[in-house]
């Protein structure tokens, strides 16, 4: 078999890419601890992995970890736009991990890159949206016999995989990394909280102190965001449709009101609901001159930009990521990042420290599947609780935080209690 | 059948009791909203209820709500010490709800009171610890045929009931009120947070600002307590045995360390772990002179008082609920409320607003069982999610907080997403 | 000269009093550090002190500190109601500090006790409201020749003394302890913040989380209170008349509005303005049923109780320190502690830790005057900045908090800068 | 006299500059309210103003406000690097305000530009560092006779002016805008708090939650920064040399320790002391691998970079504004923005909302001097308290925040009290 070479934009970028990989590593201590152990124990020895992920400096650190564990990897892009060409070059040139990814590649190239990754004849797949798994099940069923497991990073991918499993189509077990608490907690609460504010500040340079900051949705993202906005001195208003979440927001000391009322008082609006048209025509009509609107939910459906366009007498770009919509009555509404995820549109997405937890779950899940492959069925698995706890434990270790362990006496006491009397 | 009369300490206390019931009502708006509806709809018409609960002003409001719904009630104490004699008098005299409860009653009287409550031949039971249910299943099986359902307030009771169900002994369905989110959230996070600080301040009158406040355990109670202690200006240290919880505490900005280290730096220590000897001999030996120790977990097992006694050269009462243990080396450690639940020992337990949520769940659960009795099996049920949401909705209404509802478009969007593509 | 004996209620209470003095000492480490130094250095050797102060366990610790410094003291009450008889007994019997104070003493006794304290022929006075200084200047001018200095604790007293100084009547120098930052910061911000909430919770047992908590006035007390109420989960609204303070409240993330608007949305109202009728008839008319009103300003003038009485169809006591005013339209408004300082009316006033700072300033000011008496003029002095800093330094030492000191290089740098280039 | 034309880089940038001016205006509502009034009242009619300021979009808004008030203005740069060429073009071309400023101009050009601004024969000067005032007093004494007043923006400038006044050299009155509370509060507490975090996040993209964040100095900047860092989920450690400030930090719930100890535990270090070598060789030697160091004090003297260079085995740029110093033992320390003011080095400096307050004080101070010029002496004046309050009042108005006013009764009460009894 001829050596796979990869397909990157410019090999000369490898050194720059290595710098970026090193910087990300600095904030990914959990992955580094796992890498150290993998290097000793080689739990993935000989495993052929085809990975289809965003080709970023954080992903590169995951690749290096899998390789340290003995895996034989090729990588392709899971999105035509998210590739960092320098990182792709570094992986291919410096680390001999063939990478198929060019930022801005067209659709044909994108799919040919996935096809190239499959040429690796994987025993294991890593996916971010299930494109590679789908091609494998549709076009390369010849390879399925050698595949023993895989992981999936996103909710979207998991939805597709569950549907496949329900129809009996899925041919091997896959771990849904998304469900781990150590991923959720970092991604949604702490990651989104900080990076949403970061995106808004970079885009607008507004002072948050004293502003009325409206958070639509009090799920984990909304809770994190509301807490951080208060922490920056804003007066936070929460809107919700779920009475339990609304009540929790009230008890946490926030003002809760319908969006129709919030629209009149808000200075800054951020949607994190996962639903559609949360900010809608009627709200635009009553907002204050100068209001700032952003979305931090996954899709750019939460702000009804069509209605905004319809209401506006003119639209212009006033700063890098800010569109000014001038209403017929002269009021100006400012939309950040065209209503797309503001932390990606106007900042750098989640910090590496967040991806550290996500990718640590990827690494230990791959190991767990390698060990347990004979016992697993072709369905979607959650990350086992003990792996989640292990990732937390490693994170604490990396932060030099020690904790207690139960004494025998305590272990016995709590155990007897849980068993009833 | 002869009218049941009740057994209270002094009927003359009725008027005083009514004042206490009114004051509690002020903070129980959800129960009052349910009472208003019950008065119209009479969902419990004709239902004979035997309730075995702490006879407090809050419980009285639950009784009045059930009665407004058409129920025919008798009440007895679920604990010999928790009865408020004035409230018992008011229920019996003013509201003709026969009550069997005298504060400080002996064991024989306690059980004879439960037996008297069973003489009511209930169709429905309300329990707080399962003593009434136990007597019913052991001594009055003749009555079981008429019982169609019941509720249980506590974790302890639920453990007993689940054991009975597992052995096939339980003869009718029971709702475990304890598991509702609207109960948990209020009890553990907000109730315990405030009332623990209240107990410590009433007992010691110390200034919390600037103190190192050690919280052992970062479950819901610990999270609430840590947040409130920080809110009062303390520097909060958290100890944990679970890495996921420990990590969450770190990410919430708290210092996390083993108790062996925390013992050396803490000014105030509060245990909320549910385990035993969380503060133990080795910790006492390294604590600073003047340290204050309290427990806010359910049992008084979290502080090892036997070890403390053993170490102490003398013990004396220095304020109402504070014992000073003088160590051999001259250091003084102060234990609040003998290590029992500090909010009950040194303050007034949970505010009525907390019991409002718990008892609202009791009331709507009773109604739900009355409606659905034909469909239910003899096992332990959780509070249905829609009842939990309804209680939250009523609480928001009582607080004059309006929220959004999904538009048809949003309903459809979110629904399509949840179903997958 | 015959030994002065004191006049206390019951000498048998001495032991109980000693326990209270010890408990307070636990929270007064700064005063204890000063006491240790005074015991070595005797800076007040031979100084005859007549002190007119609230006879509490904290004051007792001040007296013991002065005595350790060599002073020869007598003490009388500065208020007929604030005396703790057990403490008075302990001071007289156990510590041979003659004390003239009986709780509830009539006016004649009160003044005769001051007169008795003056019989001590003081060289130094300590006053809390200037009653002793006034009697000295009016009735015992024969003694003035021996008096070299004094201190005054309160704002009220300082106002009187400044008036005397302006008229050329004041005959010796007096330090206004009230102005020290270490007193202010503790009293107003941290002391009032905590103890006001403590008073309200003890009186009403309401849950603060989720309540709309209105703070009238954003001076130091208001800032402390708003911060603590937010820390307990309340949604805080601030009212102000000063635009600078109002703006600061907005920038700190609070909602600011006129009281006319706040009256309609508040659940709990606390006045800390120092002004009159801050809560007035028009506000009562628009408040929600069940609103709770309290005052934490010095005088009971901030809530217009006369107007409340006028509006009410009935008034009754519903809990220990809570009056329910039933309005003509059926709404119930609840006033805590009759509108007097709620932390004194319904709780225990400031924690000992707060008085520690105040009395530490008393002690070091007395020493400073003893040393500098020859240089001082008969006027009101502020506490010198270096004493203020010294009290802060001792407090840090007592809390085991170490800080940095400037290096020579830094000292030189900052000095050159302040001098200009 | 020939029309002054200005000297800008490229007139074609005028339109882009106007966009930037408009965006800044959005966050400068106070200045806009003053501009509206000035347009009506023309308080500066005919006043010739020579301004020497940073030529930014915010400054442009101040210029437009002065012009609306009737002033005849020329502007030159107060720093060769801070000019925005597009803004300079817009002012000159669109608004006919001659501007002498080219980004990156050499020293000769810089001074010739100031000289050009003086050719305007000003009646009034606006300075930021006192360079224009200095040239006026040294080289153009011929013009001094027509100058009636001026303002100075910075502390540095004020120090120079006070020195001139002390030596009797200053020839006309100047208002020190720096001292206004509405400037301080926004600049130091809220501005520095947010923009310092902004600079660090932009430069490093680190997650702040869970990090140990060390703040050196607890002045107004330090207080703001500590509060914001806590608000983002960091565990904040404060270092201080002043016991009063250190004590305040402790009472605000922060950990306080010497830098020697903080160096060992910190993840991120920010200096805001105004002193030199606050982070020094001994600290670098004990810091953790990966520590991040930034300065937010005025001068780049707070981190001893010479010692860092000396210790490092290699230095390299690892992200846009981040230098990695590799220590001999392999630890990596990361310095943001070469130790210069991190909010300017790595972000956009203070938000326009902050400059709004500063420049509003400039505008009303200019008006006040124009009105009162006959009464003023040649010295440095503070911004009168009533102007400060007026700026606060306008800010509240712009934020749609209404506040209370004292009733006659309250006015009288508070007045009587202040006067004593």
Image: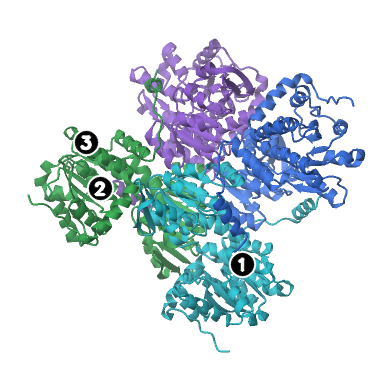
Chain colours: A blue, B cyan, C green, D purple
Spatial separation of the CA atoms under disc 3 and disc 2: 31 Å
Q: As rendered, which of B173 and A19 lies closer to the eye? A: B173
Spatial separation of the CA atoms under disc 3 and disc 1: 68 Å
Q: Chain of mark 2?
A: C
Select label 1 or label 2 by which is in front: 1
Q: Chain of mark 3?
A: C
Select label 3 or label 1 by which is in front: 1
Whether residue A291 appears in this view of the structure is no
Tag 3 and tag 1, C-beta contact below 8 Å:
no
Earlier sequence position, callout 3 versus callout 2 = 3
Task: Please state if B76 lies on the left or on the right of D155 as rendered.
Answer: right
Q: As rendered, which of B299 and A303 lies closer to the eye? A: B299
Task: Please state if B94 lies on the left or on the right of D232 as rendered.
Answer: left
Does residue C236 lie above or below A370 as drawn? Answer: below
Secondary element at image label 3: helix
Asked which quadrant contains residue D173, the reply is top left
Residue A215 in percent (x, y) is at 63, 47
The 10 Å Cα crowd at callout 2, few under 14, some 14 to 19, many 20 or more, is: many
Numbered tag placed on residue C41 in the rendering? 3
Q: Chain of mark 1?
A: B
Does residue C51 lie above or below C338 as drawn? Answer: above
Task: Return the residue at label 1.
Answer: B160
């Amino acid at each position: 078999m001829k050596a796979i070479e990869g397909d990157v934009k410019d090999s000369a970028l490898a050194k720059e890419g290595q710098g970026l990989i090193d910087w990300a590593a600095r904030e990914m201590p959990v992955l580094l601890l796992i890498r150290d152990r993998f290097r000793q124990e080689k739990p993935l020895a000989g495993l052929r992995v085809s990975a289809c992920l965003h080709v970023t400096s954080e992903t590169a650190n995951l690749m290096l970890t899998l390789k340290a564990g003995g895996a034989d990897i090729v990588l392709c892009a899971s999105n035509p736009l998210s590739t960092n060409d320098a990182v792709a070059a570094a992986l291919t040139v410096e680390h001999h991990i063939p990478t198929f990814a060019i930022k801005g590649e067209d659709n044909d190239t994108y799919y040919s890159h996935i096809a190239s990754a499959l040429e690796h004849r994987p025993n294991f797949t890593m996916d971010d949206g299930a494109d590679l798994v789908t091609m494998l099940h549709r076009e390369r069923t010849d390879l399925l016999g050698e595949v023993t497991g895989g992981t999936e990073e996103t909710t979207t991918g998991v939805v597709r995989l569950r549907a496949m499993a329900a129809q009996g189509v899925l041919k091997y077990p896959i771990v849904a990394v998304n469900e781990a608490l150590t991923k959720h907690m970092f991604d949604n609460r702490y990651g989104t909280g900080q990076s949403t504010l970061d995106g808004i500040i970079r885009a607008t340079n507004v002072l948050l102190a004293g502003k009325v900051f409206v958070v639509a949705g009090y799920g984990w993202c909304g809770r994190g965001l509301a807490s951080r906005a208060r922490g920056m001195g804003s007066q936070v208003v929460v809107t919700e449709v779920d009475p339990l979440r609304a009540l929790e927001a009230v008890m946490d000391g926030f003002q809760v009101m319908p969006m129709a009322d919030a629209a009149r008082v808000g200075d800054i609006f951020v949607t994190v609901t996962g639903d559609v048209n949360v900010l809608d025509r009627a709200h635009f009509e009553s907002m204050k001159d100068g209001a700032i609107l952003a979305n931090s939910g996954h899709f750019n459906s939460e702000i009804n930009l069509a209605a905004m366009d319809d209401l506006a007498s003119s639209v212009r770009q006033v700063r890098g990521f800010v569109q000014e919509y001038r209403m017929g009555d002269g009021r100006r509404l400012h939309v950040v990042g065209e209503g797309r995820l503001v932390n990606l549109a106007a900042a750098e997405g989640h910090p590496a420290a967040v991806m550290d937890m996500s990718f640590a779950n990827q690494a230990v899940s791959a190991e767990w599947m390698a060990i347990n492959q004979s016992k697993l069925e072709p369905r979607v698995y959650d990350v086992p609780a003990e792996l989640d706890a292990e990732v937390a434990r490693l994170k604490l270790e990396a932060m030099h935080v020690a904790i207690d362990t139960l004494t025998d006496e305590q272990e016995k006491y709590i155990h007897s209690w849980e068993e009833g009397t």
